[in-house]
Image: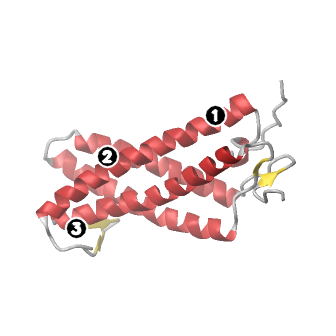
Amino acid sequence: MADPLVSPVRLERYGLTAQALHWVMFLLIVAAFGVGLWMAGLPIGPQRFKAVPWHKAIGVTIFAVMILRLLWRWRHPAPALPAGMPAWERNAAHASHWALYLLMIVVPLSGYLMSSALGFATVVFGVRLPDLLERNRELGETLKTVHFFLNKTLLAVIVLHFAAALKHHFIDRDDVLRRMLPWRARPLEKS
């Protein structure tokens, strides 16, 4: 029986909405990592007090965009994978995508929970969000560690995702990468 997730012909492209959500999420994650790294190196003071709200706003935005992305994906399944892709690679692709989706939800959520437990308000674009937890310093410190390691895990999965896309493009010479690019590219010629 043929695998319905495998295409025997040229791969279908993601739609413009899926592409936009993908690349907006990419930019938001780069911004969140950048501000987070910058913020972590700052001493307590005015610069850090300016950076933290930006980091939180980006995190809440990532969470919101991810919810939109999941809703879109639910109604618009991903295009089929290449016909010749081994089963282990298809399974790895599906697992890594769902790991990315999960991490893009739990990383911002862990930051929000950490802020609540440490007694720091989360204010996004002038709106104070409700605290999700009672103030608890010990729990807050635990959540700080969880947030740190979830971020490192997200970064690792993103690197894996990027490496896989490059492998498909330069080694397998298939359309897996190009189907997420917003511009039309010429088909690759097999060497």
Disc 1 or 2, which lies upstream in sequence? 2
Query: Considering only vertical position in the picture, is 19 above or below 165?
Result: below
- For the view shown, which residue lies furthest in the front direction? 1
Q: Is residue 88 left or right of residue 137?
A: right
Check disc 3 and report the residue beneath it: 116
Tell me what residue is drawn at x 44 percent, y 62 percent: 105
> Residue 31 appears at what percent x and percent y?
41, 46
Does the CB distance between marks 3 and 1 fall below 8 Å? Answer: no
Seen from the viewer's position, the closer of residues 79 and 27 is 79
Check disc 1 and report the residue beneath it: 166
Q: Is residue 183 left or right of residue 33?
A: right
> Residue 53 appears at what percent x and percent y?
28, 57
Label 2 element class:
helix
Q: Nearer the viewer, mark 1 or mark 2?
A: 1
Where, quadrant-wise, is the C terminus in this rendering? top right
Label 3 element class:
helix
* Alpha carbon separation for disc pair 1 and 2: 27 Å
| Mark linked to residue 89 | none
Q: Residues within 10 Å of mark 2 (few under 14, many from 20)?
A: some
> Residue 71 appears at what percent x and percent y?
59, 70
Query: Considering only vertical position in the picture, is 187 above or below 63?
Result: above
Tell me what residue is drawn at x 84 percent, y 30 percent: 189
User: Which quadrant of the view contains residue 174?
Assistant: top right
Disc 3 or 1, which lies upstream in sequence? 3
Check disc 2 and report the residue beneath it: 36
